[in-house]
Amino acid sequence: MINCQECGMPVAGRVDKKFCCDMCRNAFNNRLNADGYNMVRRINNTLRKNRRILEELCPEDKCKTTKKVLLAKGFDFNFLTNIRPTLKGSVYHFVYDYGYLELDHDFYLIVRDKRSEK
C-alpha cells in the first residue's frame, strides 16, 4: 500500500497514484510552486500596471509625457517585456504593445504597436 505524498494516508486505486484525493494533490503542488509562483505573479502585476499607465496616458497611437508624470502614476522603469532599437540608433522600451522612448529633458514619447493586433 502506498501512502499519500501530502497527508500520509493510504492511497487506494491505481498503482502509480501518489495522492489520496484532489485536495491533497492541489495542496502538494501549491506548496511546491509557491515561491516561484509568487515571484512570477508580482512581476506580471507590475508589467500589467505599467501597461495600464501607458495605455491611460496614450489613448491614441502616439503621445508625449514626462518622467515625473510616469513616476507619479507608479510606473516602474525596471520592468519591461522587450527592447527595440531603431535604424537611427534610438531604443524603444516596450511593455507588451506599448513602448516608450526617452527624449530630451525627461520627456518620453509613448507609442502603441498595432502589429500584434490581428
Image (cartoon, rainbow, N blue to C red):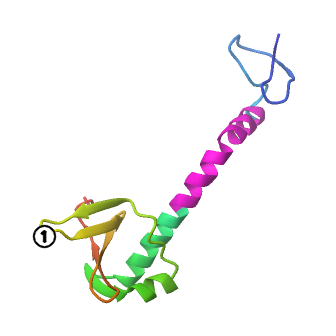
Q: In which quarter of the image is residue 14?
A: top right
Lateral position of residue 45 relative to residue 4, left or right: left
Specify few, some or many for label 1: CA neighbours under 10 Å numbering under 14, 14-19, or 20 or more: few
Residue 77 lies in magenta, yes or no? Answer: no
Lateral position of residue 81 relative to residue 91, left or right: right
Q: Name the residue under label 1.
A: 88
Q: Position of residue 46 (x, y in %)?
A: 52, 66
Q: Callout 1, which amino acid?
A: Lys
Question: In which quadrant will I find the N terminus?
Answer: top right
Position of residue 32 relative to residue 105, above or below, is: above
Element type where label 1 sits in the image: loop
Q: Position of residue 62 (x, y in %)?
A: 25, 81
Question: In which quadrant will I find the C terminus?
Answer: bottom left
Which residue is at the far left? 87
Lateral position of residue 54 relative to residue 71, left or right: left
Residue 35 lies in magenta, yes or no? Answer: yes
Dominant secondary structure (helix, strand or loop) of the stretch shown in magenta: helix
Q: Quadrant of residue 114?
A: bottom left
Position of residue 76 relative to residue 13, above or below, is: below
Magenta part of the chain: 23-44
Q: Where is residue 80 in the image (x, y as percent from the top left)?
A: 40, 63
Identified at 87% across, 23% down, the residue is 9
Q: In which quarter of the image is residue 88?
A: bottom left
Identified at 21% across, 63% down, the residue is 85
Position of residue 81 relative to residue 31, above or below, is: below
Q: Position of residue 81 (x, y in %)?
A: 38, 59
